[in-house]
Amino acid sequence: MKILVPVKRVIDYNVKARVKSDQTGVDLANVKMSMNPFCEIAVEEAIRQKEKGKADEIVIVSVGPIQAQETIRTALAMGGDRGVLIQTDADPEPLQVAKLLKAVAEAEAPGLILMGKQAIDGDNNAVGQMLSALLGWPQATFASKVEIGDNTVRVTREVDGGLQVLDLDLPAVVTADLRLNEPRYASLPNIMKAKKKTIDIKTADDYGGLSSGHLKVVKVTEPPKRVAGVKVETAAELVSKLKTEAGVL
Amino acid sequence: MAVLVAADHDNQSLKDNTLKTVTAALALSPDVDVLVAGQGVAGVAAEAAKIAGVRKVLTAESDALGKQIAEAVAGAIVPLMAGYDAVLIPATAAGKNYAPRVAALLDVAPISEIIQVVSPTTFVRPIYAGNALETVESGDPKKVITVRATAFKAAAEGGSAPIEEVDPGPGAPKTRFVSDELVKSDRPELAGAKIVVSGGRAMGSAEEFHRVIEPLADRLGAAVGASRAAVDAGYAPNDYQVGQTGKVVAPQLYIAVGISGAIQHLAGMKDSKVIVAINKDADAPIFQVADYGLVADYKTAVPELMNALAAAGH
């Protein structure tokens, strides 16, 4: 079975995003970029499934600028087999990405699509669900455990108040939550090997073209700042202030 | 224009998130209906009918809806959208699961986790873990929106809307519910609690988290939360996670114990009315948002706090 893993190149997890002074967006010039952390978890899960003999090929796909090749290369160094980059300098909306990924899924015919639940830039948490809907496949979001069986996949999901276990017919779309696994670091030999793996550079036109956008960003602003309060010396002083000054006890 | 609100509930009772989402919906239109999709939801529908400003309550019932299976919920909502210009869905784990599916089936762009309604077509939503706010205008004829409930006040009670049954849709033929493990707790629910006590990585182990954070929460009648670092390390379950990728809370009082205050955690709690931080590192970023900071090791500070609370009658 083939597993398709869509990945996104985003601002590094440890970098604080700064809003541009002209309010057109977040300043990404000279900022460290990395693979979205939830995508990394999805790549790791695909590799573990292959190691268990549940998959025979892992295809990494990304929609983004030419530099997203590096992100794909990272996933190949972890253990992906080959990559597809749909190169675009546009910043496509989740629906536009989902439509391109649908075309990729139709061309690649994977048994399972594993992807991150959310990208930490747009924070939409939408592409997996939309892709699943467009393909007419079942979905299991926020996965913390994935067990591939014969023509089905059993997914343990993080839901409000606990866990839910679902069986989905394959093919299916599964999105990864934080606790699914801890992604590995690529070893140096694997990084060298990944340089020889294939990345096909495509355009949106190879997959039916980029659909039109539905949203207009009016502006991007800084959130209101909270000001630091006072330091208290003792727990007793804290309780007294919470009672009398803040009135929350 | 008319707006549909998808109720947040557990088949037994209506969650507060629904009332807050109704408030957001009323900012779009005075014609707001509530859909209760589930199983055995007569009681939930009766509660929803009492929300002031609700025009009517729709119920859709099936086994798959009772388990909030995304394919089933989307399948129930999509045909109803012929009669609505927007659907507003609380941004809970369940809502986030099915909302984008509804949007894709309607061929519209979902708008995730709005915190403000600027106009019926323009909304504000946090991006980059809350480090930026995006004002976005939708050109779609029908809007699919998830609502960050903590950003809106709960709608009042006092309505008496009629209740009407609707078609539950095709269910989820390719998905089977196997089981669920829902944590039974006497504590208030994290998302709606008036007081939240959260622990961080400084706890060092699940046992320590259990030993330190939970008694303090219980003394205050508070919900228990955790930082992503504590969840990551396995000290606390994932549904305790407060932060951009976990739950967003805005209680009256938020007490952060041994939490450094990573950006992603702050995004989940900085709208709390009063924030207390207990951390032995005086330079921890949490102190920059805390109203009251206590620079101390939690190992001594929490027992002292327990005593001080007891002395003050808590």
Image (spheres, grey):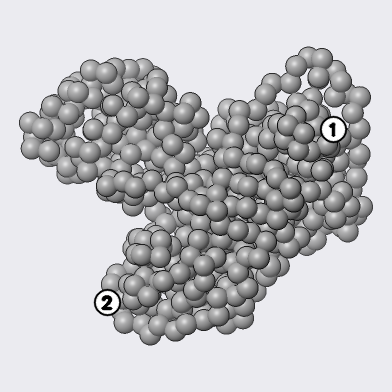
Left or right position of B110 against B88: right
Chain to which mark 2 belongs: B
> Which chain hosts label 1?
A
Residue type, mark 2 in image? Gly
Left or right: residue B97 versus residue A114 is left
Classify B144 as above or below A190: below
The residue lying toward the viewer, choosing from B17 and A89, is B17
User: Residue B177: where, in percent of width, then height?
Assistant: 56, 57
- Residue flagged by tag 1: what amino acid is it? Asp
Mark 2 surroundings: few (<14), some (14-19) or many (≥20) residues within 10 A = few
Q: CA distance from mark 1 to mark 2?
A: 60 Å
Place residue A72 in its image quadrant.
top right
Q: Residue B158 shows which numbered tag?
A: 2
User: Which secondary structure, mark 1?
Assistant: loop
Q: Which residue is mark 1?
A: A81
- Residue at 61%, 28% in the rendered image: A182
Q: Quadrant of residue A236?
A: top left
